[in-house]
Image: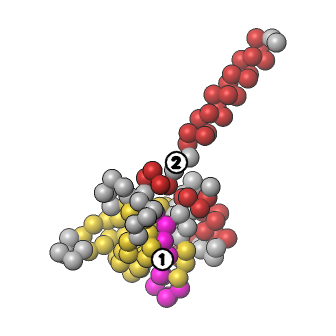
Amino acid sequence: MSRRTLFALLVGLVFSGLTALAHHSVAATYDVDHKITLIGKVTQVEWKNPHVFYFIDVTDTSGKLTNWAIEASTPNQLYRAGWRKDNLKIGDAVTLAGSSPARNGSPKASGGTLTLTDGRKVFTGSPGSDQ
């Protein structure tokens, strides 16, 4: 085996290993056994790979306002499920039910069913449903 071939194989192995590390386990980041419901207003939408993120301001029972980051499925999966980039607009009042909160207690959640302003319910998927 030539040095050039050996080098190409080693480079290929390194890059293939990096892609395997890039995808994360949902269960490691989110408590998939605990489901929460969030009601609030959309503050930001990031429709990009590898996962769509949207952010909602949620006021808790004590009146404290917290901005939650919601990790949804991939843009392609959401599009096939009927979502479009313009379904969520800044300021829209939404309800997210059945979402899994972050294990570390940060205001971050994954998946769930989102009720849009027009009353339509859409499954946001979860990063785990991509695997």
Pointer 1 local density, CA inside 10 Å: few below 14, some 14–19, many at least 20 = many
Vertical placement of 44 versus 16: above or below?
below
Q: Which residue lies furthest to the front in this view?
A: 33
Residue placed under numbered mark 1 in the picture:
114
**In the picture, residue 67 is in which quadrant?**
bottom left
User: The magenta stretch spans which residues?
Assistant: 110-120
Residue 70 makes an appearance in the image: no
Q: Residue furthest right?
A: 1
Could you tell me which residue is drawn at 43 percent across and 64 percent down? 33
Nearest to the observer: residue 7 or residue 110? 110
Could you tell me which residue is drawn at 80 percent across and 11 percent down? 2
Colour pattern of the rendering: secondary structure
Q: In this view, does 72 lie to the left or right of 70?
A: right
Nearest to the observer: residue 1 or residue 119? 1
* Disc number placed over residue 24 in the picture, else none: 2
Residue type, label 1: Leu
Mark before the other along the chain sequence, 2 or 1: 2
Residue 3: x percent and y percent? Answer: 76, 11
Vertical placement of 121 versus 123: above or below?
below
Assess whether mark 1 and mark 2 are in contact (beta carbons under 8 angstroms). no
Mark 2 vs mark 1: give the one in front.
Answer: 2
Distance from Cα at disc 2 to Cα at disc 1:
23 Å
Q: Is residue 119 magenta?
A: yes
Pointer 2 local density, CA inside 10 Å: few below 14, some 14–19, many at least 20 = few
Vertical placement of 28 versus 13: above or below?
below
Residue 56: x percent and y percent? Answer: 37, 70
| Magenta part, dominant SS | loop
SS for tag 2? loop
Q: Is residue 67 left or right of residue 33?
A: left
Residue 126 makes an appearance in the image: yes
